[in-house]
Image: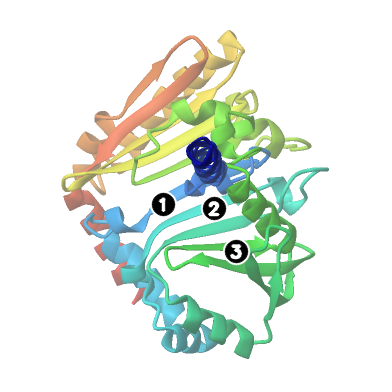
Amino acid sequence: MDAIRFSTVSRLALAGLLTLGLAADALAVRRTEDSLALVPASAGTVGVIRWNELKSSPLGPKIFSSMDEISADGDAARFLQETGLTPREDIDTVIVAMSPGGHPGPGDDDGLVIFEGRFDTNKIGDALKSRGAVLTKAPTGDAYYRLEGRVQDQEGAVALVNPGLIVAGSEPAVLAALARKESGGSGGLMSGEGLGKFLSRVDTSASAWALVDMARFTQGATGEGGGEGEPSRAVVGAMKSVTLLALQAKVHGDAVDLEATGLTPDAEKRDLLEDSLRGVLAMWRMAVSEKSPELVSVIRKFQVEHDTDSVSIRGSLPGSFLRSLAAQRHAIKN
């Protein structure tokens, strides 16, 4: 009898351990470590910049010189000194999501910025508190800092999720992002909803990329737009029919490959957009032929293509051209 009782207890204990293990696995599956999953599918635009890849490109010096200017500006410099944070070394990726005009509709989230990298969360937390931030607990149990001042008419907030991830933005946006992290990305970009339906339109491993819901951003827009010359005006006109804009840039050796794609269901507008883009390229070639003849061959290599629902323009900017452009701007600035 004792042997039977021991066998029964053993089986129950084993079943209990298995149940606990399965529950732990289920919880692990629910949470997500994918930063893109924290972006709301309802966002009007989402953009990703991989700083660590751009460091090695000819664009790097220009980008990081701008960051250095910010780092040397008053309280920003003091904040970086207190936290030991060096943006050009410690930040790997920046993800930005916004709603059109900063006025989200019901159920939408305000602006959100996600940083991936290496962060001393204790020092950053202390620096935030010294500037009036209040440590608060989210419904998910995560701690976050409510900031002084407002972001898009909402309280600002920063969540130091872990030493590799920081989420910042309006308080509702940060709370919603933390909730998506806990729920496995439900309602987020990776769920295949909203802009998430169009992720296949970009290479998400590119050095930088963006998706823009043009239908939302152009609501209420009027006027013909700027730009000189008939091709430019035609592009502006044709862009009014574009429902989605997909942009990407990829560091390729010493060059940066660029691509922009516009989706439109109107076949006639697609033809107009394609023709207009070709016209703009031709106009640019003529405009720079005397002052910058080296740019003519660069523009000539750009290609305009179309498929059943979109028009794309793609090309590559060589490192020599990018460095020359940066040098010219630096000379003008000085």
- Local packing at callout 2 (Cα closer than 10 Å; few below 14, some 14-19, many 20+) is many
Q: Amino acid at mark 3?
A: Ala
Task: Give percent across and percent down for residue 249.
Answer: 35, 42
Task: Give percent across and percent down for residue 251.
Answer: 26, 45
Q: Earlier in the sequence, mark 1 or mark 2?
A: 1
Q: Nearer the viewer, mark 3 or mark 1?
A: 3
Query: Which of the image's four quarters has the C terminus?
Result: bottom left
| Whether residue 282 is visible | no
State the residue in front, 136 or 111. Answer: 136
- Local packing at callout 3 (Cα closer than 10 Å; few below 14, some 14-19, many 20+) is many
Specify whether 94 is left or right of 105: left
Provide the secondary structure element on which disc 3 rests: strand
- Name the residue that disc number 2 marks: 96
- Name the residue that disc number 3 marks: 168
Marks 3 & 1, CB-CB < 8 Å contact: no
Provide the secondary structure element on which disc 1 rests: strand
Q: Residue at horizontal 38%, vertical 18%?
A: 305
Task: Give percent across and percent down for residue 215.
Answer: 68, 30
